[in-house]
Image (cartoon, grey):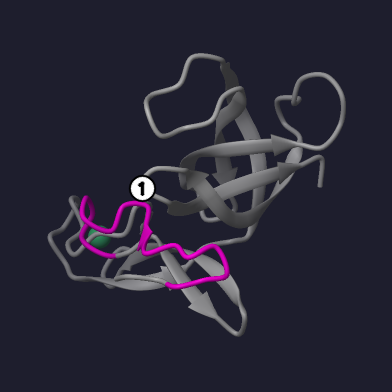
């Protein structure tokens, strides 16, 4: 899946590393995608084809655009292609999945564990330019 946006982005995070894309464009915005088991109803992130519990097929499902910050850390020394400093963290979504993503904290100081954050999608890597999920807070 290649995407073309105002940033000239040509790929999305995870497009070659998971069964399905993690982002879907919809009505001018973006949705974070997971998968739901047709048998037991367990929701997974990233999306996957088969449920590991009962081997039933999973179908793609849009995940909640908000969650609670479970844990975080600040990245001061980043891999090539990333622009430090920035925060990353785990966000617990309402569906019961935990998502690792960049965190954009709009206030001074550190993010707070348990704070509500909301989904945005933006360029998370400069070279190659890559879109990814970003959770911003406080919500
Ligand atoms: Zn299942």
In the displayed structure image, the side of residue 110 where residue 2 appears, left or right: left
Local crowd at mark 1 within 10 Å, few (<14), some, or many (≥20)?
some
Question: Is residue 111 positioned above or below 3 on the image?
Answer: above
Report x, y in % for residue 42. Answer: 36, 58
Residue 41 appears in the figure: no
Q: Is residue 68 magenta?
A: no
Q: Give coordinates of residue 124: x percent, y percent.
A: 51, 44
Q: Percent x, y for residue 48? A: 24, 59
Instruction: Please provide percent x and percent y for residue 114.
Output: 72, 31
Q: Which quadrant of the figure has residue 81?
A: top left
Q: Quadrant of residue 39?
A: bottom left
Quick one: which residue is furthest to the left in this view?
55
Nearer the observer, 42 or 24: 24
Is residue 12 inside the magenta stretch?
yes
Task: Please report the bounds of the magenta region as a residue range.
Answer: 4-20
Q: Is residue 31 left or right of residue 130?
A: right
Q: Is residue 79 above or below residue 12?
A: above
Using residue 89 as the reference point, say whether residue 15 is left or right of it: left
- Residue at the outermost right position: 108
* Residue lying farthest to the bottom in this orientation: 27
For the residue pair 135 and 52, the one nearer the viewer reads as 135
Ligand 1 location (quadrant)? bottom left
92 and 27: which is toward the camera:
27
Which residue was labeled with disc 1?
128
Give the structural element (helix, strand or loop) at label 1. Answer: loop
Against 100, residue 19 (above or below) is below
């Amino acid at each position: 899946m290649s995407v073309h946006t105002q940033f000239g982005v040509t790929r999305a995070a995870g497009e070659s590393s998971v069964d399905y894309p993690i982002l879907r464009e919809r009505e001018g915005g973006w949705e974070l995608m997971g998968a739901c088991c047709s048998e037991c109803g367990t929701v997974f992130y990233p999306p996957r084809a088969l449920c590991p519990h009962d081997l039933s097929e999973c179908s793609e499902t849009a995940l909640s655009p908000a969650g609670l910050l479970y844990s975080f850390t600040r990245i001061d020394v980043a891999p090539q292609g990333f622009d430090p400093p920035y925060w990353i963290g785990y966000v617990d979504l309402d569906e019961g999945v935990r998502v690792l993503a960049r965190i954009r904290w709009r206030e001074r100081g550190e993010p707070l564990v348990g704070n509500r954050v909301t989904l945005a999608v933006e360029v998370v890597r400069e070279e190659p330019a890559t879109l990814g999920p970003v959770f911003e807070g406080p919500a």
